[in-house]
Image (cartoon, rainbow, N blue to C red):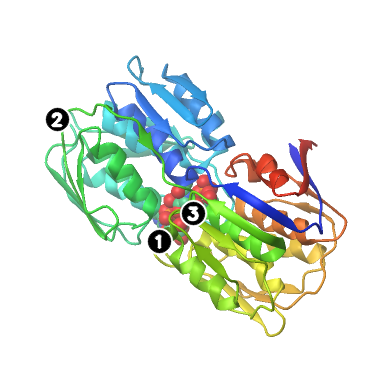
């Protein structure tokens, strides 16, 4: 277990570079096994989820070489192996091996995934998709066994009950080599879906409509990587640094941004009164003046991301007057940061899954617990704002998805250390 120790209250300044998107990377790595030639991914974030996915690849005799931000994956000697437990539980995205193994071998045996404890996270839509493609899916001993019919998977129309990111990606991976056309209706529109489609199309797949609610996949017989793929910037990491810059920044430039991916987030931050200048691929966040309280409701993309509701919450605490409201429509019970923020003196509470935020002139350091990745991000920002020492236990959850976070925060002038607990 890791701890993050912060001595807060120091204004931060300077520049920070955003890494590749966690939620793209964790899909692209499993998708790499669809290729019959070696794959190169660039702009790969240094996060624990990537280390765990590489360990899973090694169990299948897939070679990995990760230097700086370039990850080479060689699946040419891959052997089909069941992935029943162990590392599978360490992250959510291990469920992408269901679609990827099914697409590559017509068979997958994968344990139930782990990931953030943010309320119920069913995978019924993933299963519905695999079954629509002709697969037989069984649930035995905490693992899912998926088998394509003898003649292979066939395209079909799949109407998702909700625009699930994971189900959309898994169905894409399973169907790129299926016979005929697959149509996904009510597909998720997140930028990470487009990134996956770009990656696969450059390897010979035929996927049209990614980023819209209807995605059409025409099955092809072979997938082969020919050129390196550069992962899109992490919009959630970017949003976290924007909040941090507005809370405690003395002028911070944030590089490697696709501004459009942050539209709904920036609209809310600017509604509060934060002044931001946008350049071609960077943003400058000015030191914040008097801020207004706001209401935030999370929704599927292009709505306000659930993964950014915790990082923006410390910013709401800095508003001068009024009551802030945060409602998470995707994961209504994603409120595990609230009792921890209370320990730091935040005037905040949860009533009927609605987070109510009141202006808080001072936070003080405390021992808190990062129950999930974005709760950890929220506490990290609060710790940087607070007077005194904050100790965040289970900082492993922050390291699951924040690229070289200690180094980046130190460069901005923060007094932060990550150590073994
Ligand atoms: C690795 C990754 O990319 N994780 C992201 C992905 O998670 P993940 O892909 O797991 O989230 P989904 O988009 O699938 O979930 C959206 C909503 O649909 C529900 N649902 C989903 C699938 C299903 O079969 N049945 C069902 O009921 C979920 O409970 C949730 O309420 O999108 C979430 C929502 O933007 C983000 O918080 C996560 O960071
Ligand atoms: C919920 C998240 O991640 P995961 O789906 O990987 O648990 C997240 O990134 O905020």
Q: Earlier in the sequence, mark 2 or mark 1?
A: 2
**Label 3 sits on residue:** 235
Left or right of residue 61, residue 220 in this image: left
State the SS at label 2.
loop
**Label 2 sits on residue:** 151
Ligand 1 rendered quadrant: bottom left
Whole-percent x, y for residue 56 in the image? 48, 26
Could you tell me if the residues under marks 3 and 2 are in contact, i.e. CB atoms within 8 Å?
Answer: no
Could you tell me if the residues under marks 1 and 3 are in contact, i.e. CB atoms within 8 Å?
Answer: no
Q: Marks 2 and 1, how far apart in space?
A: 43 Å
Count how many numbered circles sit on residues in the image: 3
Q: Nearer the viewer, mark 3 or mark 2?
A: 3
Query: Which quarter of the image is occupied by the C terminus?
Result: top right
State the SS at label 3.
helix
Whole-percent x, y for residue 316 in the image? 66, 72
Compare residues 124 and 6 and report the one nearer the observer: 6
Compare residues 53 and 147 and report the one nearer the observer: 53
Where residue 105 sits, quadrant-wise, is top left
- Badge 1 crowding class, 10 Å Cα cut-off, few under 14, some 14 to 19, many 20 or more, is few
Say above or below: 376 vs 91: below
Whole-percent x, y for residue 145 in the image? 37, 34
**Label 1 sits on residue:** 260
Q: Earlier in the sequence, mark 1 or mark 3?
A: 3
Task: Tell me which residue sits at (80%, 74%) in the image.
Answer: 361
Residue furthest out toward the bottom: 322
Task: Tell me which residue sits at (65%, 65%) in the image.
Answer: 246
């Amino acid at each position: 277990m890791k701890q993050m120790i912060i001595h807060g209250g120091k204004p931060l300044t300077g520049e920070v570079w955003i890494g590749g998107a966690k939620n793209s990377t964790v899909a692209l790595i499993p998708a790499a096994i669809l290729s019959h030639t070696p794959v190169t991914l660039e702009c790969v974030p240094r996060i624990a989820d990537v280390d765990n996915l590489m360990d899973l690849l090694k169990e299948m005799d897939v070679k990995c070489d990760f230097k700086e931000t370039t990850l080479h994956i060689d699946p040419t000697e891959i052997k089909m192996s069941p992935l029943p437990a162990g590392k599978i539980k360490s992250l959510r995205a291990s469920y992408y091996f269901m679609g990827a193994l099914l697409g590559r071998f017509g068979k997958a045996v994968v344990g139930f995934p782990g990931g953030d404890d943010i309320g119920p996270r069913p995978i019924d839509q993933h299963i519905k998709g695999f079954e629509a493609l002709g697969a037989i899916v069984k649930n035995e001993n905490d693992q899912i066994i998926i088998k394509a019919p003898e003649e292979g998977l066939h395209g079909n129309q799949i109407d998702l009950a909700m625009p699930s990111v994971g189900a959309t990606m898994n169905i894409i991976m399973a169907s790129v080599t299926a016979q005929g056309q697959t149509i996904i209706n009510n597909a998720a529109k997140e930028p990470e879906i487009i990134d996956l489609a770009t990656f696969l199309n450059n390897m010979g797949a035929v996927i049209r409509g990614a980023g819209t609610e209807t995605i059409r996949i025409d099955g092809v017989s072979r997938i082969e990587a020919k050129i390196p793929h550069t992962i899109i910037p992490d919009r959630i990491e970017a949003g976290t640094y924007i909040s941090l810059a507005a809370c405690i920044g003395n002028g911070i430039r944030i590089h490697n941004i696709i501004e459009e991916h942050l539209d709904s987030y920036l609209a809310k931050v600017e509604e509060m009164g934060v002044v931001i200048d946008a350049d071609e691929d960077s943003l400058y966040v000015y030191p914040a003046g008097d801020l207004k309280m706001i209401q935030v409701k999370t929704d599927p993309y292009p709505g306000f991301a659930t993964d950014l509701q915790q990082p923006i919450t410390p910013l709401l605490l800095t508003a001068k007057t009024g009551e802030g409201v945060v409602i998470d429509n995707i994961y209504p019970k994603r409120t595990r940061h609230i009792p921890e923020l209370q320990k730091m003196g935040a005037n905040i509470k949860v009533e009927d899954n609605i987070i109510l935020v009141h202006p808080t002139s001072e936070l003080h350091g405390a021992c808190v617990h990062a129950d999930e990745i974005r709760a950890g991000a929220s506490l990290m920002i609060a710790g940087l704002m607070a007077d005194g020492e904050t100790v965040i236990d289970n900082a492993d959850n922050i390291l699951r998805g924040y690229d070289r976070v200690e180094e980046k925060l130190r460069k901005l002038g923060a007094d932060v250390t990550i150590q073994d607990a």
